[in-house]
Image (tube, grey):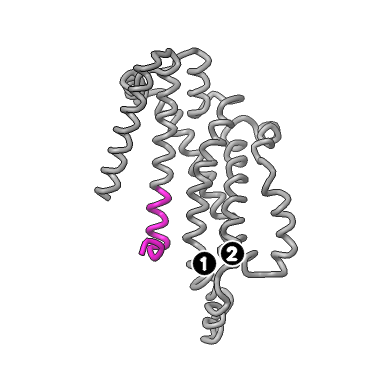
Amino acid sequence: MLDKARGYVGATVGLFVIWYALAATFKLQALPSPVIVFADFFRLLPGELSRHFAISLYRVLVSTALGMVLALPIGLVLGREERLDRFFAPLIFILYPIPKVVFLPVFLFLLGIGDVSKIVLITVIVFFQILVTTRDAAREIPNQSIMSMQSLGATKWQIYRHVIYPASLPKTFTAIRIASGTAIAVLFFAESFATEEGLGYFIMDAWSRFNYADMFGGIVAMAVMGLLVYELLELLESRLCPWSKL
């Protein structure tokens, strides 16, 4: 834990120095000094910025949790049940490459401009990323592991619970971490129009007003949110599958 904290501090200092050097070199209004940005960030944090941060964090966490809860069991079953996989795999392969973000106008029309449309959009994107990885992870489990449990009289439920689920979970969490970055990127896009809440709105509103200090403050807040989500997933993985860290 201490080594990780030192790593984060070192990386932050390094980025701060590079940022400061670029700002001092180019002297552009659109690239303010990190000293100005962080002063503005901490000024805004107790009020407006914290509200937008909380809304965006809520949307990402709910979407990621829903995507995981829906995709994990379906992926495990499709990975081990050939008949079901033969039926559903073509549908997955057709839908997976489609950029789901193009459906945002449809979701906004059907579900409104509030939280629901954005959560549904991000959930759909996260769902497919987790589903494909979990399915492949379940398929890669050696049949000998299944047969050894069957020889001991294990039921299908017990095989899923004690073999397939724990063997697939580490790769599933890798997919979730990747999907969380995608979720935050999509959230920024979804919040950048037809809404007045969230960090995406805050950043684009500041940009439209040429308030670059506020804009970069929002970017810093989004980076902090991404780090919090990533660390939360790391903690969850260490609790649910500690064997993956051995």
Horizontal and vertical percent for residue 172? 51, 57
Residue type at mark 2?
Leu
* Residue 42 sits above or below residue 80 on the image: above
Whichever of callouts 2 and 1 sits on the residue coming sooner in the sequence is 2
In terms of secondary structure, where does tag 1 sit? helix
Horizontal and vertical percent for residue 53? 43, 31
Horizontal and vertical percent for residue 10? 28, 38
Horizontal and vertical percent for residue 40? 35, 19
Q: Tell me the number on the disc at residue 100.
A: none
Residue lying at 48% horizontally and 28% vertically, measured from the top left = 199
Is the C terminus in the top left, top right, bottom left or bottom right quadrant?
bottom left
Q: Compare residues 246 and 218 and report the one nearer the observer.
A: 246
- Residue 189 is left or right of residue 36, and the answer is right
Residue lying at 51% horizontally and 47% vertically, measured from the top left = 178
In terms of secondary structure, where does tag 2 sit? helix
Q: Compare residues 239 and 51 and report the one nearer the observer.
A: 239
Q: Is residue 226 magenta?
A: no
The reply to whether the C-beta atoms of the residues labelled 2 and 1 are less than 8 Å apart is yes
Residue lying at 69% horizontally and 43% vertically, measured from the top left = 98
- Check disc 1 and report the residue beneath it: 165
**Image: magenta residue range:** 232-246
Q: Is residue 243 magenta?
A: yes
* Residue 222 sits above or below residue 129 on the image: above
Dot 2: few (<14), some (14–19), or many (≥20) neighbours within 10 Å? Answer: many
Residue furthest front in the image: 25
Residue type at mark 1?
Tyr
Measure the alpha-carbon separation of dots 2 and 1: 7 Å
- Check disc 2 and report the residue beneath it: 76
Q: Mainly helix, strand or loop, the magenta region?
A: helix
How many numbered badges does the structure rendering display? 2
